[in-house]
Amino acid sequence: MAAALVREAHLSDRLRKRLRRPVAGRGCGSLASEAMGWRRSRERRGCDTAYCDALVVLLTALDKWRRDPDRRR
């Protein structure tokens, strides 16, 4: 699902590749884990502005998808 959201977000190829990479220092490769951790902490530890903006776009798309009453469970 994350890959589909990244595609729909119209991000640059560089950011798309970066978002798919395993999360450095977190011991997992989950984009959702990184995004939710970033959202909860409100800290931008070592993230550049473009990457943080991409996470915001992705979180917004994920939130819309979660709230969509027509999505399959």
Image (tube, grey):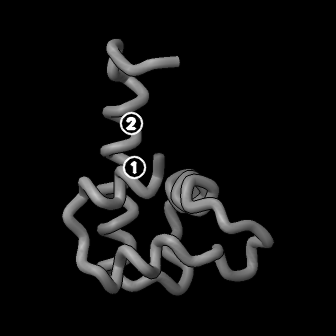
56 lies above or below 64 = below
Looking at the picture, tell me which residue is in the foreground, 46 or 63. Answer: 63
Q: Residue at x 29, y 59 (%)?
A: 7
Three-letter residue code for mark 2: Asp
Q: Viewed as shown, does residue 49 lie left or right of 46?
A: left
Per the image, the residue denoted by label 2 is 63
Which residue is under mark 1? 59
Q: Could you tell me if the residues under marks 2 and 1 are in contact, i.e. CB atoms within 8 Å? A: yes
Label 2: few (<14), some or many (≥20) within 10 Å?
A: few
26 or 39, nearer to the observer: 26
Identify which amino acid the numbered label 1 is placed on. Answer: Leu
Q: Position of residue 72 (x, y in %)?
A: 45, 19
**Residue 15: quadrant of the picture:** bottom left
Label count reads 2
- Give the residue furthest to the left: 10
The structure residue drawn at horizontal position 39% and vertical position 85%, both measured from the top left corner, is 48
* Residues at marks 2 and 1, CA–CA distance in whole angstroms: 6 Å
Q: Which residue is at a point 33% across and 85% down the rendered structure image?
A: 14
At label 1, counting other C-alpha atoms closer than 10 Å, the crowd grade (few under 14, some 14-19, many 20 or more) is some
Label 1: element kind: helix
Q: Which mark is residue 67?
A: none
Residue sitting at the far top: 69
Q: Position of residue 51 (x, y in %)?
A: 37, 76
> Where in the figure is residue 20, as x and y percent of width and height?
51, 71
- SS of the residue under disc 2: helix
Q: Is residue 66 above or below residue 7?
A: above
Identity of the residue drawn at 24% across and 78% down? 12
Rendering quarter of residue 26: bottom right
Relative to 19, residue 39 above or below:
above
